[in-house]
């Protein structure tokens, strides 16, 4: 193995670790953070600080500033993915939705992404649609468990968050976003500002001095959950196949559930474990359908 290939291997391993473990652990970090911070304020500080750090780093590296059209596109995607997508998950965890359950619910994003892609005329195989149907069964099972059955508002917020993230993910491929990691930096800057403004309009205030644990959780979310993980995701999108870059969808729920159980004392019922298995199987089926099967196409008419 040459020095170049060895470096590429370790960069790939580090990027996958960031997506699998760091992104999976952010759900528990959010749970710790909202013990002292109002949810919208926590998410706003996270993304604004993360955006400033990443944006400054990229400027020092000589990265070009986004154009006006790129800022507008980043604003749209930043609001859909981060402000609404992650912001509502943070609010739901503040409403006592366990971090592991939140991660399982968010694992449905690839299923909704497939559905929204139909708006742009993208066709899919029967295998992929079967995955969507199975995923819906998993969502129903998850909502019958005691963690969400007694918290319908929290469940609804995470569902809206997942829909928003999926719609933004599909739309982002058709917008003139900034190149490379600058897209993530611009999106975080705008989403952070929107979340903090919404926090102020909602009347959120600190009720006391944040605990050391919550401050450490916020720092972890800024540096690791935002700057490092977003940069890793952008690196993977540029250097590996999309199937590998998005494979975190299978791993994050299990990481979040295990951390929630091991560190937070969270518990899943048998039905919720079954729902987790069903949802992950559905996501896997959608991905396999995308890779292995092509939807049937109508041959052109002969004239």
Image (spheres, helix red, strand yellow):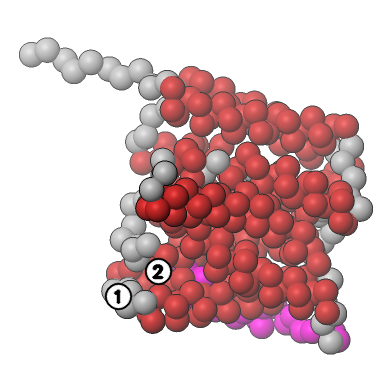
Residue furthest to the bottom? 209
In this view of the protein, which residue sits in the foreground, 75 or 203? 75
Q: Which residue is drawn at 86% across and 49% down?
A: 261
**The residue stretch that appears in magenta:** 187-208
Magenta highlight on residue 172:
no
User: The N terminus is located in which quarter?
Assistant: top left
In this view of the protein, which residue sits in the foreground, 55 or 299? 55
Asked if marks 1 and 2 touch (Cβ < 8 Å), the reply is yes
Q: Residue at x 50, y 58 (%)?
A: 232
Residue furthest to the top? 302
> Which mark, residue 182?
2
Left or right: 248 in relation to 37: left
Circle 2 crowding by C-alpha within 10 Å: few under 14, some 14–19, many from 20 = many
Q: Main secondary structure of the magenta part?
A: helix
Q: Which residue is drawn at 30% across and 75% down?
A: 64
Left or right: 92 in relation to 111: right
Name the spot of residue 199 as percent of width and height, x first. Answer: 67, 78
What is the spatial separation of the Cα atoms under label 1 and label 2, in whole angstroms?
Answer: 9 Å
> Which mark, residue 64?
1
Name the spot of residue 243 as percent of width and height, x first. Answer: 47, 38
Secondary structure under tag 1 reads: loop
User: The C terminus is located in which quarter?
Assistant: top left
Name the spot of residue 52 as percent of width and height, x first. Answer: 51, 80
Q: Is residue 273 visible?
A: yes
In the image, residue 264 sits, relative to residue 268, either above or below, namely below
Q: Which residue is drawn at 66% across and 47% down?
A: 252
In the image, residue 286 sits, relative to residue 8, either above or below, namely above
In the image, residue 50 sits, relative to residue 26, either above or below, namely below
């Amino acid at each position: 193995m040459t020095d170049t290939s060895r470096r590429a291997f370790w960069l790939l391993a580090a990027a996958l670790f960031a997506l699998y473990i760091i992104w999976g652990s952010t759900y528990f970090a959010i749970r710790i953070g909202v013990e002292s911070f109002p949810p919208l304020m926590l998410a706003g500080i996270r993304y604004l600080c993360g955006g400033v750090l990443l944006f400054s780093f990229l400027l020092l590296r000589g990265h070009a500033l986004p154009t006006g059209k790129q800022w507008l596109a980043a604003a749209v995607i930043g609001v859909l993915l981060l402000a609404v997508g992650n912001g509502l998950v943070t609010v739901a965890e503040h409403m006592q939705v366990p971090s592991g359950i939140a991660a399982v619910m968010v694992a449905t994003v690839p299923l909704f992404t497939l559905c929204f892609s139909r708006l742009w005329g993208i066709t899919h195989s029967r295998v992929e649609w079967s995955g969507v149907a199975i995923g819906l069964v998993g969502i129903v099972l998850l909502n019958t468990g005691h963690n969400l059955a007694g918290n319908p508002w929290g469940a609804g917020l995470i569902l809206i968050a997942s829909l928003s993230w999926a719609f933004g993910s599909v739309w982002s491929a058709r917008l003139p976003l900034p190149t490379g990691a600058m897209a993530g930096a611009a999106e975080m800057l705008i989403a952070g500002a929107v979340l903090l403004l919404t926090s102020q309009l909602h009347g959120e205030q600190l009720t006391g001095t944040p605990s050391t644990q919550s401050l450490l959780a916020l720092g972890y979310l800024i540096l690791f959950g935002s700057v490092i993980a977003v940069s890793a995701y952008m690196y993977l999108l540029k250097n590996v196949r999309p199937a590998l870059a998005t494979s975190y969808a299978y791993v994050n729920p299990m990481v979040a559930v295990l951390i929630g159980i091991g560190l937070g004392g969270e518990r899943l019922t048998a039905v919720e474990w079954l729902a987790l298995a069903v949802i992950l199987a559905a996501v896997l089926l959608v991905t396999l359908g995308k890779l292995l099967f092509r939807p049937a196409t109508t041959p052109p008419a002969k004239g």
